[in-house]
Image: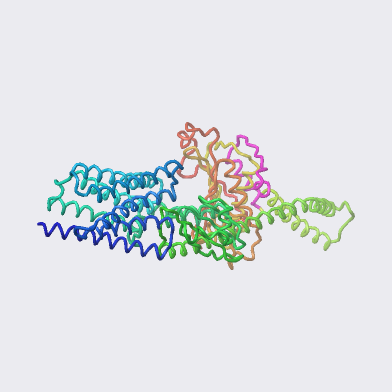
């Protein structure tokens, strides 16, 4: 048993020496000053552990052990001071305590080496208490501070606190327990517990990539969602850069970060001021990259050059490993793509806005001359400017038709500009949707060819809607004229009016060319036309459905479409029934026959 206890003591000493060597090596490789304090503490502890195994050490060696032991605790305090600075008084007080501790310790191993056990215990207790203050205060601080940190830093700080908490407990138990803990069994137990501190401290300072990944897992989902949101949906470049920096910091468990454009201008920053970031990027302040903290700079490949995504580690992120570097680089590539996408979106928005401005201006400017031309043409046609011969009359007729097409286009463009600027005022009056549908049919009747048949499927009762009648008529007329236009082989075109559940609807169905599913999204966009061999010869602006939907939505309605390519389409305009509160909504179905057979059919075939 005694042998087993001796082996346990040797084992613990060896583990602490290994820890000291490993951490010392890490520190030598990365040379972070903050971590350096902790490395010094652990190396000192390792030496204490090794020297402590020398049987019957000479007095001088015992004194050295005491000094190193106190120093190890003091280095832990300095480690804390690096990032949670101590007040001036506390800092000075710590030096005094260090001197007292060393004094007590040296007295203990020299003058009082063979004194009364109570004195030895008291001196030992004084020494351990000072060491416990040096290490205990920081670990409580670390633990509390860790609550606010990203997962990786939080786990690192907690492991460190846990490791030191074990050491303090063991030392205090060792001194206070006296002979009770000197039994071989007690020694084995305390040493085994002390052994747990070694991996805990080691993992806090140099966690392997796998462990870092496991720690990060808890945040992974939030991170993934945020990144997707960030890269796909953020449209402003500035907002994207800000959020990308924030998440880069979290991704690798850093404390601060920033993004610089290729000219070194800081475009986003998190937990670091712009001036400091600018100094780092221009290389004037190397302190952050070399000694105090770790810094990773990943290139951002942008059209205008190579920018930088930099993240800065703090005391809570003692070492960045290759894992973090490659992760940040991969992330930087996504951020570059996101920034590029946002840049293109911003450019497109600017172009779009210029285009709109131009179109608005052009359409307003064209309106005047076109009105004058129309006036003169009607005078010509009426013979008010002298009699025209047959060819002249024919030419005037063609010109009048073309000018009226042009006028229609101009009016549509002006209306769409108005919509964009929010300048559309709708005249909401109570109207019968059947009447609106009928007058829309009247407008398109001249377009019908013999191969088309227009069927009006209208209910018997009024379908009361509160809308702008003229604009609603235009919407329905456009749906009907589309149905005719995009049914080159003819067929039945149905205009069905119904009301149900608080909504009124006009559904215009045709047996025409139909629309491919993937093209549906284009239909309702400004100037959105689907050009196929069947439609390329047809005239159109791509504004009708855009305006229709916008106007419908302005009136709390919508336009939807159901279509099968090659078989036909149904465009449905929905509008709320007049006075359609919840009450009207529940009675709505009773107002007209819901989905039953048409009660009244008007055939408006031109044949
Ligand atoms: P326009 O008809 O002037 O091009 P619209 O905005 O009214 O503009 O329609 C947009 C596009 O939607 C049309 O170019 C056409 O490709 C498609 N479309 C509209 N109505 C139909 C329909 N009934 N059948 C098939 N395609 C249609």
Query: Quick one: 521 or 18, which is closer to the camera?
Result: 18
Task: List x then y, in percent, for residue 555.
Answer: 58, 41
Residue drawn at (35%, 46%), measured in percent from left and top? Answer: 134
Which residue is outermost to the bottom?
A: 533
The answer to whether 425 is drawn above or below residue 535 in the figure is: above
Residue 448 visible in the current orientation: no
Query: Quick one: 232 or 138, which is closer to the camera?
Result: 138
Task: List x then y, in percent, for residue 411.
Answer: 71, 50
Which residue is outermost to the left?
A: 1
Q: Is residue 151 left or right of residue 246?
A: left
Q: What quarter of the picture does the C terminus occupy?
A: bottom right
Question: In the image, which residues are magenta?
Answer: 416-445
Q: Toward which corner of the image does residue 237 lie, by quadrant?
A: bottom right
Q: Is residue 533 magenta?
A: no
Q: Is residue 352 left or right of residue 90?
A: right
Q: Is residue 423 magenta?
A: yes
Which residue is outermost to the front?
A: 111
Q: Is residue 263 left or right of residue 222?
A: right
Residue 421 visible in the current orientation: yes
How many labels sit on residues? 0
Query: Quick one: 586 or 448, which is closer to the camera?
Result: 586
Which residue is outermost to the top?
A: 583
Query: Quick one: 395 or 11, which is closer to the camera?
Result: 11
Question: Quadrant holding ligand 1?
Answer: bottom right
Q: What quarter of the picture does the N terminus occupy?
A: bottom left
Task: List x then y, in percent, for residue 551.
Answer: 61, 45
Overall secondary structure of the magenta stretch? helix
């Amino acid at each position: 048993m005694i042998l087993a206890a001796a082996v346990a003591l040797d084992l613990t000493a060896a583990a602490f020496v290994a820890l000291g060597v490993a951490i010392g090596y890490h520190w030598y490789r990365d040379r972070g000053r903050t971590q350096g304090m902790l490395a010094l503490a652990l190396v000192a502890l390792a030496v204490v552990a090794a020297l402590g195994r020398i049987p019957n050490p000479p007095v001088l060696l015992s004194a050295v052990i005491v000094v190193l032991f106190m120093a190890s605790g003091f280095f832990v305090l300095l480690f804390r001071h690096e990032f949670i600075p101590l007040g001036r008084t506390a800092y000075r007080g710590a030096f005094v305590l260090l001197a007292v501790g060393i004094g007590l310790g040296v007295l203990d191993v020299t003058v009082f080496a063979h004194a009364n056990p109570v004195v030895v215990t008291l001196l030992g207790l004084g020494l351990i208490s000072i060491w416990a203050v040096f290490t205990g205060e920081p670990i409580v601080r670390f633990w509390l501070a860790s609550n606010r940190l990203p997962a990786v830093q939080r786990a690192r700080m907690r492991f460190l606190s846990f490791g030191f908490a074990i050491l303090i407990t063991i030392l205090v138990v060792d001194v206070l327990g006296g002979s009770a803990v000197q039994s071989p069994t007690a020694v084995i137990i305390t040493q085994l517990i002390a052994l747990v501190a070694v991996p805990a401290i080691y993992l806090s300072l140099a966690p392997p990539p796998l462990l870092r990944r496991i720690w990060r897992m808890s945040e992974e989902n939030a991170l993934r969602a945020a990144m997707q949101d960030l890269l796909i949906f953020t449209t402003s470049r500035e907002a994207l850069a800000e959020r990308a920096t924030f998440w880069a910091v979290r991704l690798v468990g850093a404390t601060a970060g920033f993004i610089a454009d290729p000219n070194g201008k800081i475009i986003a920053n998190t937990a670091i001021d712009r001036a400091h970031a600018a100094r780092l990027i221009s290389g004037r302040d190397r302190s952050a990259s070399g000694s105090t903290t770790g810094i990773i700079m990943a290139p951002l490949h942008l059209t205008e050059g190579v920018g930088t995504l930099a993240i800065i580690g703090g005391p809570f992120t003692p070492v960045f490993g290759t894992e973090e570097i490659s992760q940040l680089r991969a992330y930087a590539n996504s951020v570059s793509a996101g920034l590029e996408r946002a840049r293109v979106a911003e450019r497109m928005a600017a172009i779009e806005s210029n285009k709109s401005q131009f179109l608005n201006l052009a359409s307003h400017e064209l309106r005047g001359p076109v009105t004058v031309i129309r006036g003169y043409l009607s005078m010509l046609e009426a013979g008010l400017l002298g009699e025209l011969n047959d060819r002249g009359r024919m030419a005037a007729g063609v010109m009048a038709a073309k000018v009226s097409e042009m006028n229609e286009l101009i009016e549509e463009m002006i209306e769409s500009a108005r919509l964009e600027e929010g300048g559309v005022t709708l005249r909401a009056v109570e109207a019968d949707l059947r009447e609106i549908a009928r007058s829309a049919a009247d407008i398109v009747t001249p377009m019908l060819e013999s191969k088309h048949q227009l069927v009006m499927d209208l209910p018997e009762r009024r379908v009361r809607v509160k809308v702008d009648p003229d604009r609603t008529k235009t919407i329905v007329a456009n749906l009907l004229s589309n149905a005719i236009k995009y049914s080159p082989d003819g067929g039945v075109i149905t205009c069905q009016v119904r009301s149900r559940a608080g909504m009124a609807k006009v559904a215009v169905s045709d047996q025409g060319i139909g629309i491919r599913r993937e093209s549906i999204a284009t239909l309702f966009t400004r100037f959105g036309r689907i050009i196929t061999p069947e439609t390329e010869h047809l005239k159109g602006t791509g504004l009708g459905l855009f305006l229709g939907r916008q106007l419908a939505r302005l009136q709390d309605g919508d336009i939807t479409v159901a279509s099968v390519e090659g078989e036909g389409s149904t465009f449905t305009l929905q509008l709320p029934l007049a006075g359609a509160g919840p009450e009207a909504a529940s009675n709505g179905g009773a107002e007209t026959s819901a989905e039953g057979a048409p009660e009244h059919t008007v055939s408006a075939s031109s044949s």
